Amino acid sequence: MEKFEVNILGCGAALPTTRHLPTSQVINLREKLFMIDCGEGTQVQMRRSRLKFSRLGHVFISHLHGDHCFGLIGMISTFGMMERTAELHIHSHPDLEQLLTPQIDYFCKGMSYPVVFHPFRPGERAIIYEDKSVTVETIPLRHRMPACGFLFREKPTPRHILRDMIDCYEIPLCWMNRIKNGEDYVAEDGTRIPNERLTTPSDPPRSYAYCSDTSYLPRLAEQLKGVDLLYHEATFADCDQLRARQTQHSTAAQAASLAKEAGVRQLLIGHYSSRYEDEEQLLSEARAIFPPTTAATENLCISIPPATPAKGEAER
Amino acid sequence: MEKFEVNILGCGAALPTTRHLPTSQVINLREKLFMIDCGEGTQVQMRRSRLKFSRLGHVFISHLHGDHCFGLIGMISTFGMMERTAELHIHSHPDLEQLLTPQIDYFCKGMSYPVVFHPFRPGERAIIYEDKSVTVETIPLRHRMPACGFLFREKPTPRHILRDMIDCYEIPLCWMNRIKNGEDYVAEDGTRIPNERLTTPSDPPRSYAYCSDTSYLPRLAEQLKGVDLLYHEATFADCDQLRARQTQHSTAAQAASLAKEAGVRQLLIGHYSSRYEDEEQLLSEARAIFPPTTAATENLCISIPPATPAKGEAER
């Protein structure tokens, strides 16, 4: 199965603690790395998680609060010192470019690679990135400034060829792509071999959604329907519900309610307020509503398995 | 004895490693905190070293390479979230103000306290800060951009009054300050009591010098003469001497030679290149030339004792 992993680099809220770092995550999809948010300390956390700098091509910034983007300039500067040549693409609210450019110009003079900004409007639901294996869609959120989450959807992969059957029917090589894409084989004499005899289904495409920072938004259930893994902020415990509302954050229970309503497979909570000594309370409040909940922690790596094992997988 | 401590928050060079953080230190002088440099991650390191944010009033930036200042915006922003009201003073090359101001304006809207910039010219030796207990003087260095070190000199403290002798000679209260400052007491009848009978000497004033980043500059020995503790960068080992020259850094042996030449009491080395697995080699190369050398490490706290115990101290 192709790799689809979420690496947590930081899962604390804005105020620094010695237990958590500000927000950053790296999605490893088939050995290509995608970063979501980049709080202070992210570059060291990448080292700690043994994620290769050179594999990172795209960074997605949810909103322009410092705890989600102050690590960018250090990381950009380090890539320059390491003489990176590949483009680094930054997808964010349009304001980021004018904030970062003077810093890059000053601190990274004569840099060896280009930083390419891709502005988007966080308030509009749109596909902002696409390649042959994934689409990234914005999830408009409600926070004290324009903010959005990101929905990573793997594209369907071709069906698995059953080599023995191909040999048995003496199917020519030029048919392989059509058969992988689900076509029946039709021999020169008109004999039709149904695709199901020649292939097994590919793994169902997987999906990952990131929602932070945001008020509790029940309307998200529609966009998040059936997602394999949802990361949702759980800044506060139930007892601080009022504070959550005032600061436009969510409680652990609200994150869990949304996960349940959307029918996601797994929930990962994070963005913990510095006021809590540990995450036990947040985790138990979420699990009471949605049992398959995990508490994020720095350098945790979660692998997203396919929803139902593909036939070929099950037979092994 | 009054507190004079150096807290190492980060002592690595520019490239991130999981062993060291970029440069930052905090001087604790009589419970007032002074920061030198502020690399990425400094605010968390302050927490880790249990240094109170509210006691920090002044930050001195040696030069505008990212590994010496990328932590400023995060720290400034955090102080704002904590509703600090006291001014934060930043002493640096004049360029810093125009680099930081747009970031402060965007990320710290409606901030609760003022950041006050104090530009200075790193190439000129000058006293850039002074209060009742300390002066801070620049140490012009040679690096790939304008850079300087900082020399913290404690001011002499008044002599210690011998209470019993004051009572014995029935000296009036209004004389106390003059006696503490070394004057003899002259009674109304003209009797003179020498100051030495009424006081013991205060602790000799202490000094701390910080030199990073810089080429080896033997001429610094004159300005650093007799300093109690010298922190000097030791980016490279002897085998990488050429690299040190090319990048305008120093080797551990060069740091030690300067310490020896200047007759400092103790040497602290740091700013280690990421190429070394540990600091053993650097430390042994320095100690071969200047035995009282210590290798800096994150969250190390070094207390600076007075050069010779004051008489009062010795008698206790």
Image (cartoon, coloured by chain):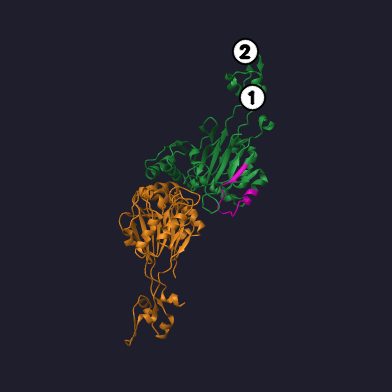
Chain colours: A orange, B green
> Is residue A304 shown above or below A65?
below
Q: Which callout, 1 or 2, points at the residue further toward the start of the chain?
A: 1
Q: Quadrant of residue A29?
A: bottom left
On the rendered structure, is A290 left or right of B129? Answer: left
Residue A72 visible in the displayed image: yes
Q: Amino acid at mark 2?
A: Glu
Label 1–label 2 contact, CB within 8 A: no
User: Crowding at label 2, few (<14), some or many (≥20) Cα neighbours within 10 Å?
Assistant: few
On the rendered structure, is B286 left or right of A39? Answer: right
In the rendered structure, which segment of residues is drawn in magenta?
A: B267-284
The chain letter for the residue carrying disc 2 is B
Residue B203 spot, x, y in % from top left = 63, 31
Q: Amino acid at mark 1?
A: Arg
In this view, the residue in front, B32 or B69, is B32
> Is residue B132 shown above or below A306?
above
Q: Residue furthest bottom?
A: A189
Residue B40 spot, x, y in % from top left = 48, 48
The residue pinned by badge 1 equals: B163
> Is residue A182 shown above or below A129?
below
